[in-house]
Image (tube, grey):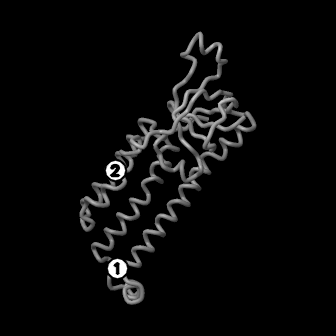
């Protein structure tokens, strides 16, 4: 049940959706496409542009967070059920773990925020080029299996760690330390009891999904 490219494309496209929606609104607003419509004139008289944009951004953020949660639950709920029933995965011990560095998320944050401050909102060319760049970035993320830095996991109550895991005993590990795997793990728990066994399923590359056994 490893993930293919489809699941990764869904994750990354959903991650960039808030940026795309905001860019589309700013393009429409910058070109005054609906300036003289009845509802636009009513909003201008009764609410004002600044308050309308505030509520619009709030709506986009709220919608995006709900969508993030729905997508991750849809992708992971089946994993949770099948791992707990031991239909998939293997039992591993976690020897040590730590949070991923904030620096690992810097590229995603830059690509998310930079278009909001650096492009001409009225230009069709700029909009198309920026959307193309986002597509290229998503392709790069998918090609390199970089789902560990995807922000959707946090909105679904899951945590991402760098960890060492092993399906062998500590005695065997002393003789052959290479049986320990340096991986990225995704798990619901914030703190892990290293004395416990975990049910583990590989997602992509060196990224594994864990549940408590």
Query: Is 56 left, or right, of 83 in this rendering?
Result: left
Position above or below: 164 against 76: above
Position above or below: 173 against 94: above
Query: What is the quadrant of residue 79 in the picture?
Result: top right
Position above or below: 202 against 24: above
Q: Secondary structure at mark 1?
A: loop
Say which label, 1 or 2, has the lower sequence index. 1
Q: Secondary structure at mark 2?
A: helix
Identify which residue, 124 or 74, lies in the foreground. 74
Where residue 168 sits: x, y (%)? 65, 19
Where residue 94 sits: x, y (%)? 62, 29
Which residue is tagged 2? 110
Outermost residue to the right: 85
As measured in the structure, the alpha-carbon distance from the residue carrying label 1 to the one carrying label 2 is 31 Å
Which residue is tagged 1? 34
What residue do we see at 57% from left, 17% from top? Answer: 179
What residue do we see at 55% from left, 24% from top? Answer: 181
Query: Is 122 left, or right, of 51 in this rendering?
Result: left
What residue do we see at 69% from left, 29% from top? Answer: 195
Is the Cβ of the residue at disc 1 closer than 8 Å to that at disc 2? Answer: no
């Amino acid at each position: 049940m490893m993930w293919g490219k489809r699941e990764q494309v869904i994750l990354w496209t959903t991650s960039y959706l808030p940026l795309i929606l905001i860019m589309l609104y700013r393009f429409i607003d910058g070109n005054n496409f609906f300036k003289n419509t009845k509802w636009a004139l009513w909003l201008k008289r009764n609410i004002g542009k600044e308050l309308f944009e505030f509520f619009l951004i709030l709506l986009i953020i709220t919608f995006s967070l709900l969508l993030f949660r729905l997508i991750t639950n849809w992708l992971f709920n089946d994993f949770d059920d099948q791992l707990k029933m031991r239909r998939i995965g293997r039992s591993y011990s976690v020897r040590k773990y730590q949070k991923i560095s904030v620096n690992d998320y810097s590229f995603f944050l830059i690509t998310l925020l930079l278009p909001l401050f650096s492009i001409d909102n009225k230009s069709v060319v700029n909009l198309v080029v920026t959307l193309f760049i986002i597509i290229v970035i998503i392709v790069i993320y998918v090609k390199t299996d970089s789902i560990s830095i995807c922000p959707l996991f946090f909105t679904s109550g899951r945590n991402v760690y760098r960890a060492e895991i092993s399906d062998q005993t500590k005695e065997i590990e002393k003789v052959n330390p290479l049986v320990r795997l340096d991986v990225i793990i995704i798990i619901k728990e914030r703190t892990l009891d290293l004395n416990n066994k975990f049910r583990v399923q590989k997602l992509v590359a060196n990224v594994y999904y864990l549940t408590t056994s």
